[in-house]
Image (cartoon, rainbow, N blue to C red):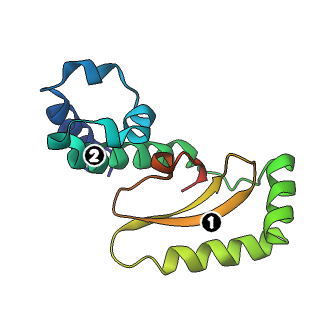
Amino acid sequence: HHDKHYQAYVDKLNAALEKYPELYNYSLCELLQNLDSLPKDIATTVRNNAGGAYNHKFFFDIMTPEKTIPSESLKEAIDRDFGSFEKFKQEFQKSALDVFGSGWAWLVATKDGNLSIMTTPNQDSPVSKNLTPIIG
């Protein structure tokens, strides 16, 4: 998955940026947070492929061979915003299973520090909405 699927997003993004080399200086987050200001002829390609690259890199980075538990501060925030870790897991799983076709389920932090579960279609990313992904 990493060597072909993820690499295809990176290659297609780089190909789209070739016409606008000044955009090579932008991080994936910066590209996703500024989609409305990108040249119209590449905006959709950047959204799809920067989103795909970001989402997959994020997912690969949080994968571990061992079962992990949330930090104390994350557990407290989950308990505050969902009632309990078990309720969070149930809600997250339901959201993920409700994604029709391709897409993602996310635990995100809002600017005010609250946690929320959201889904995105295809390779859209919560970063585009200025949300901070925690689990995806």
Q: Position of residue 4 (x, y in %)?
A: 24, 47
| Residue at horizontal 37 percent and vertical 25 percent from the top | 26
| Residue at horizontal 78 percent and vertical 74 percent from the top | 86
Cα distance in 3D space between marks 1 and 2: 23 Å
Q: Report the number of numbered marks.
A: 2
Above or below, 41 against 65 in this view is: above
| Residue at horizontal 86 percent and vertical 63 percent from the top | 80
Which of the pair 19/72 is nearer the observer? Answer: 19
Residue 4 seen: no
Image quadrant assignment for residue 20: top left
Q: Is residue 106 left or right of residue 11?
A: right
**Disc 1: which residue:** 117
Q: Is residue 29 left or right of residue 76?
A: left
Which of the pair 65/36 is nearer the observer? Answer: 36
Q: Amino acid at mark 2?
A: Asn
Which numbered disc, 1 or 2, marks the residue that appears first in the sequence?
Answer: 2
Q: Position of residue 134 (x, y in %)?
A: 63, 50
| Residue at horizontal 27 percent and vertical 46 percent from the top | 49
Quadrant location of the C terminus in the rendered image: bottom right
Mark 1 closeness class: few <14, some 14–19, many ≥20 residues within 10 Å: some
Which of the pair 43/100 is nearer the observer? Answer: 43
Q: Secondary structure at mark 2?
A: helix
Q: Position of residue 63 (x, y in %)?
A: 55, 49
Q: Is residue 96 left or right of residue 21?
A: right
Q: Position of residue 43 (x, y in %)?
A: 24, 44
Above or below, 133 against 27 in this view is: below
Give residue 49's mark. Answer: 2
Above or below, 134 against 81 in this view is: above
Q: Amino acid at mark 1?
A: Ile
Q: Secondary structure at mark 1?
A: strand
